[in-house]
Image (tube, rainbow, N blue to C red):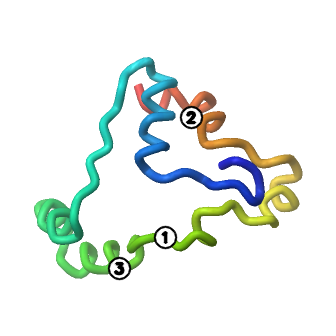
Amino acid sequence: MTGATGNVGRPREQAHAIGDVLGTPLRFTELARAEARSAMLRFMPEPVVDGTLSILGEPTAAERRGSPDAERVLGRPTRTFAEWAVRNAAAFR
């Protein structure tokens, strides 16, 4: 996240930020809905797959921005996704 009104980043950018922290380039491969559905059906029940894909959809610009209330709720300034990745690098190893 880049502040209360900043862009939280798209998955491709987030994957790159995590890869930077790990020192390992990560690839992000976007799948068409049908491809994602087919892959998910291998390990999830159909109603869960369809519900998940409906919820995920394509985020709007407003959904990609951090909430202006985040700083108030957190009691501190928001941080960037890259900062979060640095603090949580061990979880990705």
Q: Mark 1 or mark 3, which is nearer the start of the sequence?
A: 3
> Label 1 to label 2, Cα distance in Å?
21 Å
**What is the x, y in percent for residue 60?**
53, 73
Q: Which mark is residue 59?
A: 1
Q: Is residue 56 above or below residue 12?
A: below
At 14% from the left and 60% from the top, the residue drawn is 39
Q: Mark 2 or mark 3, which is nearer the start of the sequence?
A: 3
Q: Mark 2 sits on what residue?
A: 85
Q: Is residue 76 above or below residue 61?
A: above
Location of residue 5 by image quarter: bottom right
Q: Amino acid at mark 3?
A: Ser
Residue farthest to the front, as pictured: 61
Q: Mark 3 sits on what residue?
A: 54
Quadrant that contains the C terminus: top left
Q: Which of 66 and 76 lies nearest the eye of the viewer? A: 66
At 63% from the left and 72% from the top, the residue drawn is 62
Location of residue 43 by image quarter: bottom left
Determine whether label 3 and label 2 are within 8 Å by CB.
Answer: no
Q: Amino acid at mark 1?
A: Pro
Q: Secondary structure at mark 2?
A: helix
How many C-alpha atoms fall within 10 Å of the one at disc 1: few (<14), some, or many (≥20)? few
Q: Mark 2 or mark 1, which is nearer the start of the sequence?
A: 1
**What is the x, y in percent for residue 75?**
88, 52
Q: Is residue 41 above or below residue 31?
A: below
Q: Amino acid at mark 2?
A: Ala
At 36% from the left and 25% from the top, the residue drawn is 25
**What is the x, y in percent for residue 79?**
73, 43
Q: Is residue 18 left or right of residue 26?
A: right
